[in-house]
Image: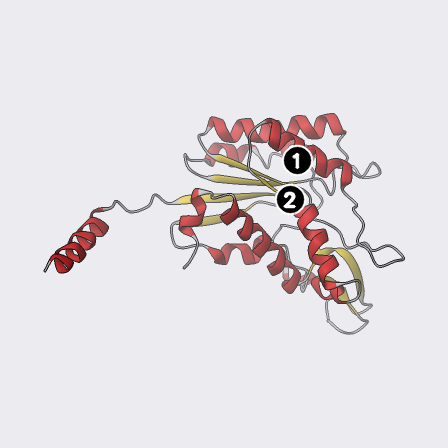
Amino acid sequence: MNRILFIALLTLVAFALPPKKKITVWLIGDSTMSIKETKYYPETGWGMPFVYFFDSTVKVDNRAQNGRSTRTFMEEGRWQPVVDALQEGDYVFVQFGHNDEVETKKSYTTKEQFKANLIKYITDTRNKKANPILLTPVARRKFDAAGHIEGTHDVYAQIVRDVAKENNVPLIDLDKEGQTLYQQWGEDKSKLLFNQLAPDEHPNYPKGKEDNTHFNELGARMIAQIVLKNIRSLNLELVERVKK
C-alpha cells in the first residue's frame, strides 16, 4: 500500500510542476553555422541540424550569415534586432573568427576589436538576463605532410578562450574538438565531412568543389553533435530541453 501511495504522490507532484517557459536559442556567426540556400547544397551549416535536438519549449533562431565577422555582423544591423528580441532565459551562441582573422577581407577585425566585440555580445546578452555561450571558430581541415592536423585559427581561437575565461562565460571549443575529429577520421576520410565533390557529382557544382572550410550534411551533423555534447558537459539548463 505504501508503494502505491508513493507512486501516487510522485504522479501528483509531476502534474503540479509548472510547464517550462519557452525560450529561444539564438545562433549568431558565420557561414560554418548559417542556413544555406538550396543552390549551395550539399553545403550545410551546423546550425541547420542543430535545430532538431530540442523539444517544443525551444525555438532555434539561426541568424548566422556567410562572410560575417564580429564587426560586420553588428555594423550591418544584424545584432541589434536580436538584442531587442532577447527574453530572460534565452541563449545566444556566438561563433566568429573565420572572417575576423583574414587581413585581406573587408570583414577583417583587429585582435583588440575582436575581443571588444565579443565582450559587447556578452554584455548585451546579460543585460537582457539571457545566457551567452562563446564558441571558437570551428576548425578547418588542414593536414601537414605527415598527416597531422594543423590549426588555422590559433590566435583568434585563443582570444575567444581568454574572453570566455575572463568573463566567466561557458565555452565550446570547436577549434580543438574539430581538429580532434578530423585527426580521428584521417586525412582522406575526413574529406567526407566537407563540401568536396568531383566534377558532375552534384548539379550545383558541375565543375566539382574542394572546400576544407564548409561542411556537407554529415559534417554539419557531426559538429552539431559536438555542440550538443558540450551543452551536456557544461550542464546548461538547456540540457533539460533536449529531446529524450
Q: Which residue is labeled 1 in the image?
A: 161
Q: Position of residue 81 (x, y in %)?
A: 52, 35
Q: Quadrant of the N terminus?
A: bottom left
Instruction: State the SS at label 2.
Output: loop
Q: Are marks 2 and 1 in contact (CB under 8 Å)?
A: yes
Give the numbered dot on residue 81. none
Write the residue at 55% across / 32% down.
Answer: 80
Q: Quadrant of the C terminus?
A: bottom left
Q: Amino acid at mark 2?
A: Asp
Write the residue at 66% across / 31% down.
Answer: 162
Q: Position of residue 147 (x, y in %)?
A: 84, 59
Q: Cα distance, mark 2 to mark 1? A: 8 Å
Q: Is residue 30 above or below residue 217?
A: above
Relative to the observer, which residue lies in front, 148 or 175?
Answer: 148
Spot the residue most to the right.
Answer: 145
**Apparent side of residue 169 relative to residue 37 in the rendered image (left or right):** left
Q: Is residue 209 above or below residue 89?
A: below
Spot the residue most to the front.
Answer: 2
Q: Which residue is labeled 2 in the image?
A: 173
Q: Position of residue 56 (x, y in %)?
A: 38, 54
**Apparent side of residue 21 relative to residue 66 in the rendered image (left or right):** left
How would you rate the neighbour count of disc 2 (Cα within 10 Å): few for under 14, some for 14-19, many for 20 or more?
A: many
Q: Position of residue 240 (x, y in %)?
A: 40, 49
How would you rate the neighbour count of disc 1 (Cα within 10 Å): few for under 14, some for 14-19, many for 20 or more?
A: some
Please tell me in which quadrant of the rendered image residue 209 appears.
bottom right
**Apparent side of residue 219 relative to residue 12 in the rendered image (left or right):** right
Instruction: State the SS at label 1.
Output: helix
Q: Amino acid at mark 1?
A: Arg
